[in-house]
Amino acid sequence: MLPPSCKRFFIMADVSAPAPVSQNRRVLSIQSHVVYGYVGQYTVELAATFPLQILGFDVDPLNSVHFSNHGGYPTVTGERLEGAQVAKIVQGLEANGILQEYSHLLTGYIGRASTLEVVSDLVKKLRAANPALKFVLDPVMGDDGRLYVSAEVVPIYRDVLCPLADVITPNGFETSLLTGVNVTSTQTAIDACEKLHEIGVPTVIITSAELQDRNDQGTSDVLHLIASHRPSSARFVIPFQKISGVFTGTGDLFAALILAHLADVPQNTDETAYLKRACERAVACMQGVLKKTVERNEEKARRMGLGESSDKATFLRCHELAIVQARVWLENPKAVCRATDI
């Protein structure tokens, strides 16, 4: 049974209109790239790039890896960029005076310690070129108790990159890696956010966690977003429906949506209210995309004759995010769960 605040999810009510578009909205996006599939950055429809573009941003992708498909498939071919290779690309951007063009930096899966060190230097260069630059960091390290990266990457995220970020968007597992706190309740979520504020992160958004004290009768059909902001004392939770299915690229999409909906805060605006609005809109977008994905993938599975005997690659091809098909949800999110202060 859903909590009362989450039942609003099924009311098709428009969220407030988007903020006015500013003159300079260019994002340098450092993500993984796959030729087929919907994670990080792809060739045409991009998990981070496409949503940002339709929301009014120019996006320059810098690929951390170049793979045939995401790592869930039985076979993956391609290559990872080393830190030195990424540094050469940055040198070209710097030499041509391009770094000053960026209003935002967005980072997703990087994986290599050497590349993370290059990114930390890049943040400093970008801020020297544009002191108003906003850095949204998705510390992609793992999920569901499984680490995607080598253990040496964790302290670099915690000690080097997190203190440089304006906003971080870890999932519950990544939050535990960064803080040592297992996020299972409202209080442990608060404790984890405080630890991240202590290392210098102004805005913490834990994208998904099961808060047992907020689920009726111990049900697990509701997940929670937890957000906390400093120097204000804003702290809130948003419950949302857990949609069954196999999804990849959701973290990449969510981080991009947060960047977009936190941009262009009008002067004299209550930052707390604006953060709540941004998170509510991002959750609504995600739910719309996932519901459309389930609908599209069920039809695709029928066309492909997917059954119990289907191989893993065939199964995964029927479970890629339907981002393009869900464009209307990205542009005009509806049916949003509301934030509650904690």
Image (cartoon, rainbow, N blue to C red):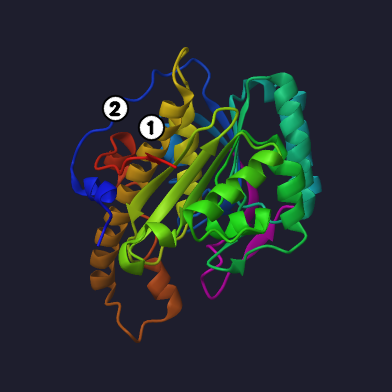
* Residue found 49% across the figure and 15% down from its top: 23
Chain part drawn in magenta = 61-82
Query: Dot 1: what SS?
Result: helix
Query: Dot 2: what SS?
Result: loop
Q: Is residue 325 visible?
A: no
Disc 2 designates what residue? Answer: 16
Residue 99: mark in rendering: none
- Amino acid type assigned to the residue bearing label 1 in the image: Arg
Picture layout, residue 249 above or below residue 316: above
> Residue 124: x and y, percent?
76, 30
Disc 1 designates what residue? Answer: 277
> Residue 236: x and y, percent?
44, 41
Left or right: 270 as drawn, with respect to 326: right
> Residue 283: x and y, percent?
37, 45
- Amino acid type assigned to the residue bearing label 2 in the image: Ser
Q: Are marks 1 and 2 in contact (CB under 8 Å)?
A: yes
